[in-house]
Image (cartoon, rainbow, N blue to C red):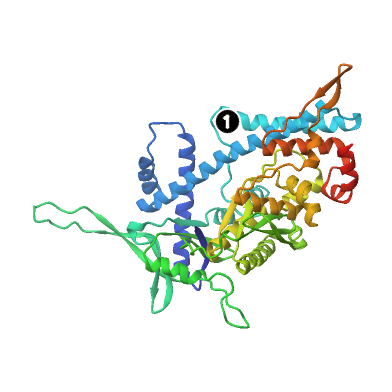
Amino acid sequence: MKVTSRCLLYNPSVEHFQIIVDMMEHFCPAKHYAYKRLEENRFNAEFKIYNLDKIISKKYSLNSRQSKDAIEQARQTLISQEKLLDLNITEYEGKVEAILKKFDKGVKTEKRQGLISKLDKRLRKLCTYLDYKRNNTLPSIIFGGKDNFYKRCKDLISKEEYQRRRNNQFVSRGDKTKKGNPNLRIVIKNGESFLEITTLECNVKEPRLKTDGTYTKLKPIYKKILTPIYIPQKLSKKTGKINGFDYKPALLTQVAKEEPYQVELLIKEGKMYAHVTFNLDKTDLICTGHNYTIGIDTNPDGLALTMIDNNGNYKWHHYLKNSELLTARGNRRTNLCGELVKEAILTAQTYCSAIAVEDLKFIKDRDVHSKIARKTAQFCYRVLLCTLESACYKNGVEFIKVKPQYTSKIGLYKYCHQFGMDVHNGAAMVIARRSYGFKEKVPRLYRNLFKPIPTIKKEELIYENINYSNEWSNWSNVSKRMKMILQKDCYPRFFIENRKNIKDMILA
């Protein structure tokens, strides 16, 4: 697993700071130039990247390694734009299809005009993205950020300030053959950490006469500077002990082993940061699912935990709730996610159990009400799952991903009333059972839902039968029939509170 440590270049001299800024002003335009050339030659079989490498080195006065790093950054940006285009097409196709289904079911007169205007907007967006796909082009991107671009258009910031914000990055990839990182290398001298930076200034080594009468090639020797670097280490103010995972010795171990690591220099608010990305050695698994597994269901306001044994039997359930997740700002929300994950990891270590979660992939392919849209937009599921996976990796806890289909429905209809828990903990129990490979059979009570359904088509009474086949299709049929029975009241709380009455309706 790769992790990133946010380091700081502290107290750099004015000369060194200006040298780094000058390097960024060469590197960022080189990356922009490489992106445009790669975009123009996406389907050109005759295009060679090594020719682009030579052009960039000559045009922007970068060494071969730096120009290759700029090309790689541009290539990764191009790949992300291609994936984003496909994702936008998928999302808007789903939104158009969802609106058309509403028209098929019938729309009230007062809502018809609003849906027509919404459909028109979605179709225009979809046609725009499909035109890009059809013409083998990509939407234009703004390097340096859209906000800064609009501020410059409104003349809120000067041209120099805009260029400074646009050209504020320098990246150097790691290389095993170069003993870590050739252009931005972390070195230790007298117990202190320094960043050795290869600058753009170079001297040419004079050719030397060989024994066979020929001369050696001209070899440029680049000037190097040393700048103190602070590698963060979080210490408790009370005890002086390290809080959380200690990244500093892990990074210095990789440096001592001469393992590759990537360094990205950034300027933010007048400070020079160095984001160091390196491979973290995996901790031996201590907590596994041999005896117990904790299923975790992620929600906008917390984590639902349910533990089962290796036979699939229920043990206990608990909900780690923090309502501040819905309203907190970015950094605060990330910290709260870390606190929730820490509690979950401590629980897993207490019972020496594995952790199972859903393999979620949210696609915004349908329009929802403003309240639901706001709630889903604030749902930081990716931060929760990534933080949880990283914590399991560091603490030796087995981390299992399962498919998320019908976990909430199965938990609601099968386990909530049996163990007195809400729908989220019921879903967590299904997740834990699925990690062991257990099947979820439909209870006998719901077998009555598979009887023929009488429907009227063209004034004729027709009986439509629902087959009882495999697991997921069965629960899909149960969910559809529940919606027919409950209609507008088909939500978890109503089902749990009125289960006895619903049971009589099913048996009737």
Amino acid bearing label 1: Lys
Where is residue 198, by image quadrant?
A: bottom left
Q: Residue sitting at 63 percent across and 33 percent down?
A: 129
Q: Secondary structure at mark 1?
A: helix
Q: Residue furthest left?
A: 212
Report the side of 279 relative to 295 (left or right).
left
Any part of residue 230 in sight: no
Give the camera-side residue of 301 and 73: 301
Q: Is the residue 116 above or below the residue 32 in the image? A: above
| Residue underneath mark 1 | 133
Where residue 401 sits: x, y (%)?
Answer: 59, 51
Where is residue 386, by image quadrant?
A: bottom right
Report the side of 447 relative to 175 (left or right).
right
Report the side of 60 relative to 345 (left or right).
left
Q: How many numbered discs?
A: 1
Q: Residue sitting at 76 percent across and 59 percent down?
A: 327
Q: Residue sitting at 65 percent across and 47 percent down?
A: 153
Where residue 459 sits: x, y (%)?
Answer: 89, 17
Q: Residue sitting at 91 percent across and 32 percent down?
A: 110
Give the camera-side residue of 445 and 395: 445
Q: Quadrant of the C terminus?
A: top right
Where residue 289 sits: x, y (%)?
Answer: 58, 58
Any part of residue 228 in sight: yes
Report the side of 370 relative to 187 (left or right).
right
Where residue 252 sits: x, y (%)?
Answer: 43, 70
Q: Is the residue 148 above or below the residue 119 in the image? A: below
Are there few (<14), some (14-19), or many (20+) residues within 10 Å of tag 1?
some
